[in-house]
Each structure stands twice: as C-alpha cells, then as structure tokens.
Image: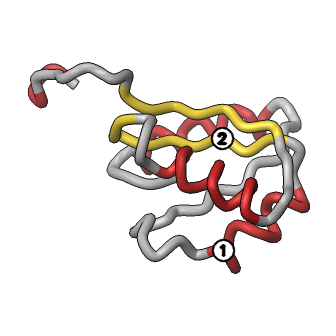
Amino acid sequence: MYDLSFNQVQYAKNILETIGVSIRILNLRFINPFDAEIIRPALEEYKLVVTVEDNFLIGGLYSILAEFLLKNRKTTHTLPFALKERWFKPALL
C-alpha cells in the first residue's frame, strides 16, 4: 500500500479477517527507493498481492512491483487498485 488510503485498507482488512482471510498490510511510505527487504517475505508468504494507491497505475507501486518481480525472476498473483489513466478533480476523488 502506498498513499493516503490506509484507513480504507485497514477497514477492508478487518472485514476480510472476520471471514477467515489472512491479511498483511505493508504501508510503504515511499516507493523510491523500493524496499525489497519488506516486500520479499510477503511475496513468499501470500498467494495474492494487492496494491492500493491513489496514483496512476502506470509508473506507480504496481509498476515498480512488476519490475521487481521480473528482475528477480519471480511470479505472483497481483491485483492492483489505482487510478485509471485519466485526470480527475481532486475534490471529487
């Protein structure tokens, strides 16, 4: 997770845990430099990695994660949540 949506992610985590889904939140304050030592164990422990960010999908956390996976010859199921490639009015986000 990278951005200001921590409260929403925490809320979703609480709901999913009530039905038995194991969740781990990694709050990445910065995406550059990319902290591989935090990400690597999560990639090995979980079957699905969900990225949540209030930025564009391309060039954000999801892209950096994909580059990291490719560079390290790893694969994982990923589900990105980010803005589409369109501009928005901040007050309406």
Amino acid tagged 1: Ala
In x, y percent, where is residue 75?
Answer: 85, 48
- Could you tell me which residue is drawn at 77 percent across and 69 percent down? 40
Amino acid tagged 2: Val
Residue in the foreground of this view, choosing between 40 and 59 = 59
- Could you tell me which residue is drawn at 43 percent across and 48 percent down? 60
Secondary element type, mark 2: strand
Looking at the rendered image, the disc whose residue lies closer to the viewer, 1 or 2, is 1
Q: Residue furthest bottom?
A: 37
In x, y percent, where is residue 5?
Answer: 39, 44
C-alpha distance separating marks 1 and 2: 16 Å
In x, y percent, where is residue 77?
Answer: 81, 37
Residue in the foreground of this view, choosing between 90 and 10 = 90
Tag on residue 50? Answer: 2
Picture quadrant of residue 73: bottom right
52 relative to 41, above or below: above
